Image (cartoon, rainbow, N blue to C red):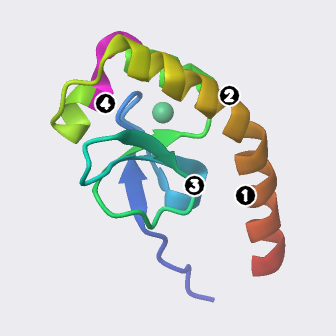
Amino acid sequence: MRPRKVPLRKCVACQDMKPKKELIRIVRTPAEEVQIDLTGKKAGRGAYLCGKVSCFKLAKKSKALDRALKQQVGEHIYDQLEQDFVAVEEQFIANKELISDEAE
Ligand SMILES: [Zn+2]
């Protein structure tokens, strides 16, 4: 059995390479809004973070999203994203389990 190739993306906070489904995409939309993109399909420049709040906190501290999105991300935007991140974390983990169940 040949191992399937899984596309890897790098978490901008901890620099780990992981399969896309284990990462949460943050997108800078064409309207220059910074949002969490759970679908992974929104238009705009994207950055990936591990699906855990600790990585978000690291990104906030090191301003990793500013660099990855090539845009200054204000403190209040990080605060808003952090709240959203906590809110989606559970959904994200549930989805991930759903996806891996389907794959088996
Ligand atoms: Zn990470």
Rendered location of residue 27, percent (x, y) = 37, 48
Disc 2 or disc 1, which is closer to the eye? 2
As helix, strand or loop, the secondary structure at mark 1 comes to helix
Q: Earlier in the sequence, mark 2 or mark 3?
A: 3
**Callout 1 amino acid:** Lys
Residue toward you, 11 or 32: 32
Mark 3 close to ligand 1, CB under 8 Å: no
Mark toward the start of the polypeptide (4 vs 2): 4
How many angstroms separate mark 1 from mark 4 (CA)?
23 Å
Q: Mark number for residue 65?
A: 4
The crowding category of the residue bearing disc 4, from other C-alpha atoms within 10 Å (few below 14, some 14 to 19, many at least 20), is many
Proximity of marks 4 and 3: CB atoms separated by less than 8 Å: no
Residue at mark 4: C-beta within 8 A of ligand 1: no
Q: Which residue is mark 3?
A: 38
Calculate the distance from the C-alpha at mark 4 to the C-alpha at mark 2: 17 Å
Q: Give the spatial CA distance, label 4 vs label 3.
A: 16 Å
Q: Main secondary structure of the magenta part?
A: helix
Residue drawn 28% across and 57% down? 44
| Amino acid at dot 3 | Leu
Query: Which mark is on residue 29?
Result: none
Disc on the earlier residue, 3 or 1: 3
Please name the residue shown 81% across and 52% down the image.
94
Q: Position of residue 13 (x, y in %)?
A: 39, 28
